[in-house]
Image (spheres, rainbow, N blue to C red):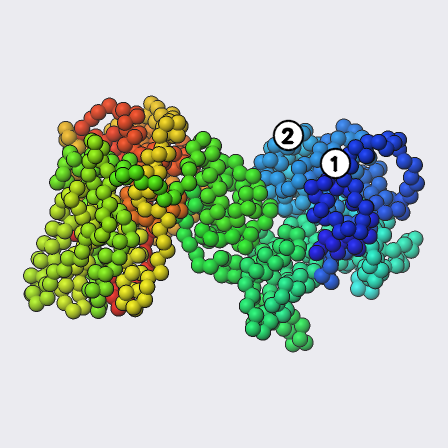
Amino acid sequence: ERLGWMRREAGVALLVAQEKLAEEVAEGGEVVVLVDGDKAEIEKRAKTNIEVEVAGENLAYVLFTSGSTGKPKGVGVPHRAVTRLVKGVEYARFGEDEVVLQLAPLTFDASTLEVWGALLHGGRLEVYPAGTPTLEELGRALEEKQVTTLWLTAALFEQMQGRQGEALRKVRQVLAGGDVLPVGRVRERVAAGVLVNGYGPTEGTTFTACHRMEEGEEVGWGVAIGRPVENTKVWVLDEWGKEVPVGVWGELYVGGEGLARGYEGRPELTAERFVPSGYGDGQRLYRTGDVARWARRGVLEFGGRRDGQVKVRGYRVEAGEVEAALVGLGGVREAVVVAREDGAEGKRLVGYVTPEEGAAVSVEELREGLRRKLPEYMVPTAFVVLEALPVTANGKVDRRALPAPEMTDVRRGEYVAPRTETEAVIASLWATVLNQPKVGLRDDFFALGGHSLLATQLVSRIRESLTIELPLRTIFEAPTVEALSKRVEQSRAEASGVVAPPLGRMERRGEPPLSFAQQRLWFLAQLEPTSTVYHVPLIVRLTGALDAEALAFSIDALIARHEALRTTFGVVDGEPVQRIATHALSALQRVELRGLSPDSIDVEVRRHLEDVVGRPFDLEQGPLLRTLLLTLSEQEHVLALVMHHIVSDGWSMGVLVEELTALYSARVRGVAASLPSLPIQYADYAIWQREWLRGDVLESQLAYWRRQLAGAPRALELLTDRPRPAVQSVDGAALPFALGRALSDGVKALAQREGATPYMVLLTAYQVVLARNAGQDEVCVGSPIANRTRGEMEGLLGFFVNTVVMRTQVKGNPRFREVLSQVRATTLEAYAHQDVPFEKLVEELRPERDLSRSPLFQAMFTLDSTPKSSGHAMPGLSLRPVSV
């Protein structure tokens, strides 16, 4: 729609295009020349220059800018304006030895400077591929192409100077503008090379005034826009059209050879903005709408906009055009768009709308609707839906009273916390780049205030933190933490040559095999059949009116839903297999303790709980889930759920509580529970793992661990006050302590600043302490990982958890941040290779056998971040955990 309007306004009669693009842009009324499809015909034509008389007043191009009436306006730029911009100028050096990078889109008037600054002097023009580059890509391009002249918007200049200063240092002259330049970055640049601060509206052809700062020049507290460029005249006038004294603010008017012809096809608008001059030769002047003043040193200083036009990230935006587009979406009665500076990225557009009566307006619909109508830089980063717009006493919209957008205005639904380490790192990076306190899985980067420049920052930080290269377009294609994390994991898998096949319902030929993790526990159970080490208990005290029948029904429904709870283990041809019963193997055991004295009740509760938790499981006979309900009184009960680890893990316990609560609540209300269907069962995962993780795939994963653990210390030699037993036992104790809120908050803040997670910070501290205590330069620490790397696994009960080895070196007394950076990289690499079962790793690496120590590591670090119940209480009951 916008493109069609511009073509009609410009009177396009001829379209030159590639064949694949012609159909998208051709309207049918113009002559179309296909540079590829018509190539043979074109080559038959004469190759001599066509004799065409072109005068300075002839039209060179029409460039469209945002318009306050809701439609773009086409600025007609003549040939004289272009030549005046780059020929015989002093603000910059152009010559045949200059290499100019064409980075600006052709629809942005900075491209005029780039293209003709090079070509009209015989210089070299390096054309950058379409699309916004990352900072690193641009930095590499500057060095590889040996660019000597570069134009940047103010925002991109700030980022490049901050993160690619070395690459920028090699550019002889940098020109920047489009907004106020940050003084700190200007000082950094001027210390290393030439910087030109350029000011100018499109109607004045790229530059009206420039302030050239030579290398080593002193920079004050503000950056002037300098003096008019050659063949350009400026006046600072008051509201009556009179010149203001030096030091007094007024509106800036532009005249001279750089002036555009006006707005093509818009004579009324041309007459409004291009006004007769009462000065000099009486030619027209363009009213910029910008506030400026003459400083005493004879240079211009910029003071911002006077009207509703704003500069956002170097682009000029008429708020009226965005407002008109909003009202045109349907369902919107009124719309106001303002530029605010209270967002993460400085100046940003915020849209305020009131819906038509009876209409429902969603922020997402507004954003998507505008993206179809307007370019990205004109789409507000935040929206606020109001019942009515605030007005002043005279009935005008009170823009100062418009509220700042809250997180709820930009967040997609309710906050959802990251689940994996990759998600946590990316959420932390987003929070830093967007200046948000926290970012959730479903949050949209652009809805939270992100844009292309902030996206380049994000890509850079992802490269530093995750050591992975992502093209900038990935942020636009996967704009949520969840989606981007999947892309990162996919890229990691592709880089390691290990891409897993789809996980779905598997064909079952006979009884399914055990997963690798299950096989290890099954083997240990054969060695010690009476061991209770791998019992996983969940015990809660229920206070309130309990419906015991509904609870029993819910437990049976849970068992029917998950095959893992109906599984026992047998042996076929010497190999262990899963045996899955078709009906429930467990029923709720009930014990009445009502009527006993309080002391007797306590004794009986403890006896029953110690029995249900401490009685060994029979993996062959089952069941591997025990349930016990102790009734203490009408209002007091104790529920115990005990599972063997071979069919459960920590994540599973969260799923169990969530689903049991949902099943019980639905049963009590007399409705069907609305649990999502399970895409797979645990046995499908075991078959899939066995079929995938073998041969070359297993070898490529093991190769990483061989390299990572080669030469690792054999043991952690901690200083202890007792001799080590000859055979390791599982006897131990727990010592609880709290870090405190201040230290916990400090850990989180440090993690966010360093592009890490609290887990990485705490693991680093733990390893540093172990290394110092053991007097070792490096340590290996084990750490459990949920190993639920695919969405199909998230809602399953089963034994997925794996153990990875984290090796860290502290040679040379490094700073903590340096060790943290190492741990961050090690953690993410370990997680990228987490599919190798720990038991396979031990089998492959064959560490020296020592019955007094566990292999590969002797200290573990666990951060319990597995999903917990969402807190939905059972109707009429309060739940309190009980420990045994």
Mark 1 element type: loop
Q: Quadrant of the N terminus?
A: bottom right
User: SS for tag 2?
Assistant: helix
Residue at 75% from the left image edge and 37% from the top image edge = 37
Q: Residues within 10 Å of mark 1 (few under 14, many from 20)?
A: few
Check the image and report above or below for 797 versus 875: above
Of tags 1 and 2, the one toward the viewer is 1
Q: Is residue 200 visible?
A: no
Q: Nearer the viewer, residue 195 or 310?
A: 310
Residue where numbered disc 2 is placed: 143
Q: Is residue 406 left or right of residue 557?
A: right
- Look at 80% across and 62% down and name the residue there: 238
Residue at 56% across / 66% down in the picture? 361
CA distance separating discs 1 and 2: 33 Å
On screen, 5 above or below 649?
below
The residue identified by callout 1 is 36
Q: Earlier in the sequence, mark 1 or mark 2?
A: 1
Vertical arrangement, residue 590 with respect to residue 793, above or below:
below
Q: How many marks?
A: 2
Quadrant assignment, res 153: top right
